[in-house]
Every structure is written in C-alpha cells, then in structure tokens.
Amino acid sequence: MMLHALAAGVDFERYFRWRRERDGDPFVVRFPGFGGAVFTGTSAGAGEIFRAPVELLTPPLPNPIEPLVGAASLILARDERHRRGRALLTPAFHRSRIAHYANVVRDSTHDELNGFGAGPAWLSGTRVDARIAARAITLRVILEVLFGTGSGSRRVEYTAAVVRFLNAFSGPLMLLPALRHSAFGYAPWDRFLVARDRLDELIDAEIAARRTAGADARDNDVLSMLLATRYADGSAIDDADLRDQLRTLLVAGHETTATSLVWALYRLHRHPETLARLRTELADAGPDTDPLELSRLPYLDAVCQETLRLHPPVPIVLRRLTGPFALRGVAMDAGDTMGVAVPLLHSDPRVWPDAARFRPERFLDRRYGPAEFAPYGGGHRRCVGSTLADFELRIVLATLLMRTELALTRHYSRGRIPLSVPHNIATGPRAGITFNVVSHQGHSGDSYHNAM
C-alpha cells in the first residue's frame, strides 16, 4: 500500500493510467491515513457519481486539506450545513456579479507586468518565473474580490500572511496526518499553526471591523455581501463559519487559477501554431477591448478549456457514501469512498481522440457534457467559484499575451512535460516554469527595449 501511495505521489497521472490498464475501471486505491477509494475514469462512471442522490454523498473524512480550509468550509460541509452554505455563497459568485471584477483582473495583471507585484517589470531580456507571477496576480485579485483591499498596507499584510500560510502546509503535512504533531514549537506542524493563526487574526479583525461599521450588500466585495445576506430562516452566518469560508476562498480562489495560467502559457509556447492563432484573435479584438469582452473570445475560451482538460488543477473528486450504492456494477456500502480520476476522464479515447495532444480546436468542434469534462468537479458539489476561475484565467492570459512576447527558457522549451505534483489545494508543475521576455508593450502603448 505504501509503495502505491508513493507511486501516486511521484507521478499521479502515470500511476492512475497504469492502474486502469492493469485492473480496468473502476479500481481501488488505498492511501495510508486516509483509507481507500474506488476510482473511475470514464464518463459513464463520472455520470453515476455526479447524479447519485444527494443524501447518499458526503465529503470524505479525514481530509488532506482540512487543516487549510477548516472544518466549516463549504468543501467539507455536509447535509443541511452544505445546502445552507452553498445557498449563501453562490450569489456572491454569480456571473453577473463576477463581471464587475473584469477591470480588477486586468489591472492586477498590468501591475505585475509593470513591476508592482512579486517580481521585476517584464522588460525585454528579463527572466520571469511564471508560477511566482501567476500566484501574485491571482492573489491580488482574490483579495480584492473578497475584501476590497485596494493598494494599501492591508493588501501587503494579507499577501504576506497568505504566502506564509500556504508555504507552511507542505506536501508531507497534507499527505501524512501522522506528521501533524507539535514538537516544542519547532516542528513543521507548529510553523503551520503559527501561520494559520496569523491569517485568522487578519480575517477576524476584518470581520469585526465590518460588523462595527455596518456591512452593505451593495459593496462589491464578497465579505460585505456575506455579512448582509441571510439564510432562509433569517439568521446570519457566524464569525467562525465565515472565517473558514473566507480562508477557503483565499486558498482555492488563487492557487488553482494560478496553476492553470502557468500551464496555459507553457502549452501555448510549446505549440507556436496555436499561439499564433490566439494572438491573431486577440489582435483582431484590439488593444482597447474591454476585458469583459476579451473573456468571451471563442478561441481564447477553447485554449483555456483545453488547458484545464490536460491539467485539471484538482485531479480527483471524492465522495463518501452514507448508504449502499453501485459504481459501474461494483457494490459499495455506507462509509465507502468513491471518486473520479479527472485526468483519466479527460483522456478517455472514446470521448477525446488523440487525447495527449494539445488541440483547443476540439472545444470549437463540439460541446462536452458535465460527465465528460469536469475540471471543477460535478454534481451538487461542483466548485462554487468556477465562474470566477474561468473568467480570471481568460482575462489574465489575454492581457499577458497582448502586452508581451515570451519564450520558454531552454530547460522547458524541449523534452518531457513537467510532472504535476500537489501544491496545497491544487496540483501543478513541480517547479516554476521560466520564460524570457522577448518584448514588452507598455500599458500606454510605449514599447520597452531595455535589455537586462
């Protein structure tokens, strides 16, 4: 069992392909400390899981990410608590509300390009780490969406706290619960708890200040909306639950999108013909196109969808059963766990011909059902922030490509595709993927030609 767990941790996708080839579908995977799960990677199997009766499904516990998001998180909530939480959060991420953040996304990207983010300005000759830049952009966006932090010291405080918090939750802590013990303040678990406490202090202070000042649902940030919203029985969310929901949104709301952005840039620059077609679409739209309109461009959409197909940021979807169920003819009982192996689902040759190839055109040729394409999960527990993630990915990618010309560094421009490994709540490239800036078009239209 330990060898299987290690194999899955080193190369998740390869391990799952091997298991399907050896054992067929579905198959069982066991992980130390978390039990086992029956996995499927077919659209028929995914459909059975996503359409299963709501009352039969709960999130599995123990859960690797519980220390990150908290016990009250929507990701881990069950039964009536989940229904109430989802009803509260869903309006905050409705498409019509998300559209108000288009300029926030674009401006956050401009700030990173101009040197007001995590790294230097993207001038000609500069080498950039796409993962560092992507995380900086998406973190600025989610902070503005949640709290309306603006450009002051609050954003700086939040940024430092979130980065420290996420860096403290290492892969071993996530995958090996036995390591979650204190050792006189010096263990990795101790460092994680200190970082989590600091982030919670900031969130708690934000909640208290808003309650004192009086929240207004007309404000654009999510916190104001949640404070002003009521459950169906007229009650309001309490501070402890609100903190866990906000911490969940901070973690899930930027790491997953950042990872997808890195993969999109990588795939495009490994496929020059695809990059050229997308650049043509963006050029036809024009440099002054409203970012909301950019997000609706068809080939840009196809590129982002194909990136999510090949690199789903959360590669497994798990459900724990509260009663008997049959998955692809395999009888299961209450307490058993079943899951969708999303990389297998997205490479099923019966749905995806030439599945290993990066070919965005497949998303122009046809529409795929929710049991065929599920980068954000499916059923009643589909990611509540998926609309924001899609919206942000398209605007950031378009803005970067319209203002820069990049080239993959030699290490990444050839050879094998980097392995995808767990990073907190998402999986992504083991190391940051680096690019050289060939040219940079300034925000005002001025070109920069300073070699570095």
Image (tube, rainbow, N blue to C red):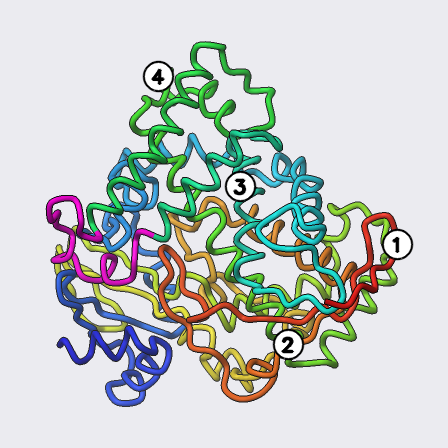
| Residue matched to label 3 | 142
What's under tag 1, amino acid-wise?
Answer: Asp
Q: Earlier in the sequence, mark 2 or mark 1?
A: 2
Give the residue at mark 1.
446
Question: Relative to 406, does residue 211 appear above or below in the rendering?
Answer: above
Mark 2 — residue?
Answer: 408
Instruction: State if disc 3 and disc 2 touch (CB < 8 Å).
Output: no
Across and down, in percent, residue 196 comes to 30, 40
- Specify the amino acid type for callout 3: Ile
Q: Is residue 398 left or right of residue 198?
A: right
- Quarter in which the N terminus is drawn: bottom left
Q: Is mark 1 on a helix, strand or loop?
A: loop
Q: In this view, does 73 lie above or below 324?
A: above
Q: Helix or strand or loop: what does disc 3 sit on?
A: helix
Residue at 66% x, 54% y is: 396
110 relative to 344 in the view: left or right: right
Q: Is residue 264 above or below residue 4?
A: above
What is the three-letter code of the residue carrying label 4?
Ser
Q: Mark 4 points at which residue?
A: 235
Quote the CA–CA distance across marks 4 and 3: 26 Å
Q: Which of 232 and 387 is in front in this view?
A: 387
In this figure, what is the number of numbered marks? 4
Front-most of residues 124 and 390: 124
